[in-house]
Image (tube, rainbow, N blue to C red):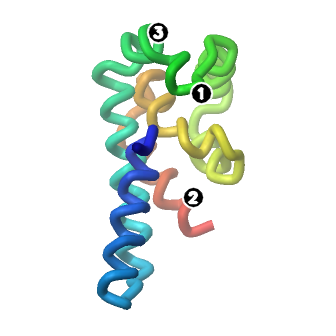
Amino acid sequence: MCRYPEKALWIAVAAYAGASHRLDLRGVIAAATIGDNLGFWIGRAVGTRLTVRYGARLRITERGLRLGRYLFVRLGGKVVLFGRFVTMLRALAGLLAGMSDMGWGGFLTLNVASRVL
């Protein structure tokens, strides 16, 4: 089972592409963006409670969570934009953005821009 919404949608798109022998880059980008947005809204709604309760099971340490929140407070949109190139941050950017009360419009814009890069 995938731990992050973006990864689950990537697997679904890959399965579809394999079964249909068609790969549409727009579908791949859309699935990844939707997955990140799911992470954002999960982070906004219940992220802090879930992370405190189940973070260890997801290999999210308290140190990593503190670092992520610090980065969002300090750097905000740069984390979303360039976090795409940092392994763990890529998977948690949406969740951390939602937990850090980042505005959804800004998150969405930067998230799509990071995919173009």
Residue 4 image label: none
Vertical order, 84 against 107 (above or below): below
> Which of the two residues, 105 or 37, is positioned nearer the viewer here?
37
Residue 58, percent from left and from top: 51, 26
Vertical order, 15 against 24 (above or below): above
Q: Residues within 10 Å of mark 2 (few under 14, many from 20)?
A: some
Q: Mark 3 points at which residue?
A: 52
- Three-letter code, disc 1: Phe
Residue 72 image label: 1
At mark 2, the secondary structure is helix
Q: Going by the picture, which residue comes out furthest to the bottom?
A: 21
Q: How crowded is mark 3: few (under 14 residues within 10 Å), some or many (20 or more)?
A: few
Q: Mark 2 points at which residue?
A: 114
Q: Which residue is drawn at 63% across and 17% down?
A: 61
At mark 1, the secondary structure is helix
At mark 3, the secondary structure is helix
Give the Cα distance between marks 2 and 3. 28 Å
Give the Cα distance between marks 1 and 2. 16 Å
Q: Which residue is drawn at 70% across and 53% down?
A: 85
Q: Residue at x 39, y 81 (%)?
A: 18
- Three-letter code, disc 2: Ser
Tag 1 or tag 3, which sits nearer the N-term?
3
> Which of the two residues, 13 or 113, is positioned nearer the viewer here?
13
Give the Cα distance between marks 3 and 1. 18 Å
- Three-letter code, disc 3: Val
